[in-house]
């Protein structure tokens, strides 16, 4: 019994000693993040019609004005008889975001017109 208690005491001591000490974690407040691409993929035409453009604008809000960005919109009609697929991509700098959104709206309208036949 004495040997068992001694062995148990030695094992407990080793396990306690073997544990790693706590590490201090430091966070930097100067972390810069950027979004360079936004992809919107759907299989329903109605979802393309109801895109919230304010949210698209908010995604790129913290980017540098000269940062290159890309907007990509995809439509995949799996249930159509011809399995219609279409996608458009528009790129430019963040400072041109308003004009990119206007062009994206026009291109999405054309995709919707084409896809309605399928």
Image (cartoon, rainbow, N blue to C red):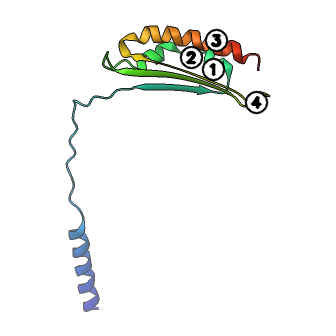
User: Which callout, 4 or 3, points to the residue nearer the camera?
Assistant: 3
Q: How far is disc 2 from disc 4 in space, using C-alphas? A: 22 Å
* Residue at 22%, 29% in the rendered image: 30
Callout 4 secondary element: loop
Q: Nearer the viewer, mark 1 or mark 4?
A: 4
- The quadrant holding residue 65 is top left
Q: Which residue is mark 3?
A: 110
Is 115 placed left or right of 34 in the picture?
right
Q: Earlier in the sequence, mark 4 or mark 3?
A: 4
Tag 1–tag 2 contact (CB < 8 Å): yes
Task: Kindly report the distance in space between the C-alpha atoms of the residues bearing marks 1 and 2.
Answer: 7 Å
Residue 94: which quarter of the image?
Answer: top left
Mark 2 or mark 4, whichever is nearer to me: 4
- x, y percent for residue 100: 46, 12
What distance separates the C-alpha of mark 4 from that of mark 3? 20 Å
Mark before the other along the chain sequence, 2 or 3: 2
Element class at badge 2: loop
Residue depicted at x 59% and y 25%: 74
Residue 26 percent coordinates (x, y): 20, 41
Sequence-earlier tag: 3 or 1: 1
Q: Which residue is mark 2?
A: 51
Mark 2 and mark 4 lie on one chain; the one further toward the N terminus is 2
As drawn, the label of residue 34 is none
Q: Nearest the camera: 63 or 6?
A: 63
């Amino acid at each position: 019994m004495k040997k068992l208690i001694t062995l148990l005491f030695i094992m407990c001591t080793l396990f306690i000693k073997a544990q790693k000490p706590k590490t201090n974690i430091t966070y930097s407040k100067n972390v810069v993040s950027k979004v360079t691409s936004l992809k919107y993929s759907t299989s329903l035409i109605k979802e393309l019609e109801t895109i919230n453009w304010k949210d698209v604008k908010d995604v790129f809000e913290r980017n540098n004005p000269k940062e290159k960005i890309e907007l990509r919109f995809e439509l995949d009609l799996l249930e159509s008889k011809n399995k219609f697929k279409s996608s458009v991509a528009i790129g430019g700098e963040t400072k041109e975001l308003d004009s990119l959104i206007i062009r994206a709206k026009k291109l999405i309208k054309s995709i919707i017109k084409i896809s309605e036949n399928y």
